[in-house]
Amino acid sequence: MLTRTCTPHFVVAGMPRAGTTFLYHNLQRHPAVHLPWRKELNYLNLHRDRGPRWYADQLGAARSGQRVGDVEPGYFLDPEVPDRLRESAPGVRVVLVLREPVSWIASVHAHLARQSEPVPPLRDFVLRGWDRRQDGGILRYRFAPRVLEALVERWRRTFGPELLVVDYAWFAADRLGALQALESFLELPPYFAPGRFDDRRINASRGRALPFVGKLARSGAIDRLAGVPGLRAAVRRARPLVDHVMAAPSGAGGSAAPVPPEVVALLAPATRRHRDIFAPGPLVRGDGASLAPLAPSRSGSPEPIAAP
């Protein structure tokens, strides 16, 4: 039986440029997970005016027993979203992948520049912030000193033990381990195992060979196409194919330009806070409790469930 809901069981809330596309495509493979036809619906940050019925329609119908998820990297950037999410989806579990601030901001800046965005120089990008038109709304990038720390603490304070904070450096080095950690935190039956996940760095820097696709997505044309009766399933199937064309092989990826020392100094407090958060280990709950990663072989665990 298929059922619709406007209250997801879990949300991957960011950061942007921290592996959320990889998580979206791999979580789609899990038989006990249902995800919407695309990531970045931007309901709670850009489209609240469309209402819960619109959101339920975007999430789509899940099979009985499936946990409904939503992957929303833009949520991390909006300080109002944690309270909105808590109010609209009581009991929701949240996953937040945190990347070291200096390399993260450099990656975001380079990514936007590659998409032919009129992005200011990196120093101004950090000091003054930048507003990006996307999906009919505005995503606000704010990186001034203490802003990043405040965003992270807002998520931790709001969700406590229902938040899993993942160190991106560990995640990038052990992507299978990260997927298995999410399974455990979200109380999903084990599925991910060697050979049962896509290890390509989807949406990686060197893979941006088709910049026009990004422009097409930001224009809203793909959304309008998916709204035509009977076409959403086709758009859903086509999306991963496009992402895989742009994917880099495992271990590949481009690098951003060097970060000026002045910017590194400005972000020093955020960098220290990042190190403090992950001092106990690469997996930390919002209440500060450390979670040990699963053993790589998953020895002693149940046999992974088969895909339907």
Image (cartoon, helix red, strand yellow):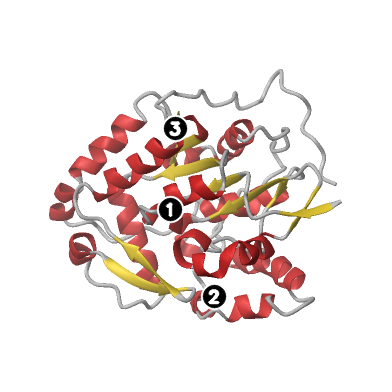
Where disc 1 sits, the SS reads: helix
Q: Earlier in the sequence, mark 1 or mark 2?
A: 1
Q: How crowded is mark 2: few (under 14 residues within 10 Å), some or many (20 or more)?
A: few
Task: Say which of marks 1 and 2 sits in front.
Answer: 1
x, y (%) of residue 171? 49, 40
- In this rendering, the answer to whether 216 lies above or below 113 is below
User: Which residue is tagged 1?
Assistant: 81
- Dot 2 amino acid type: Ala
Q: Distance between the residues labelled 1 and 2?
A: 23 Å
- The disc, 2 or 3, on the residue closer to the chain's N-terminal end is 3
Q: Distance between the residues labelled 1 and 3?
A: 15 Å
Under tag 2, what secondary structure?
Answer: helix
Q: Residue at x 60, y 61 (%)?
A: 52
Label 3: which secondary element: helix
Q: Which amino acid does label 3 sit on?
A: Gly
Three-letter code, disc 1: Val
User: 254 or 43, which is in the foreground?
Assistant: 43
Estimate the x, y position of residue 273 in percent, counting from the top left.
27, 36
Q: Residue 62 carries which label?
A: none
- How far across and how far down the image is residue 35, in percent? 67, 54
Q: Mark 3 points at which residue?
A: 160
Measured Cα–Cα span from mark 2 to mark 3: 34 Å
**Residue at image x 21%, y 46%?**
146
Q: Quadrant of residue 179?
A: top right
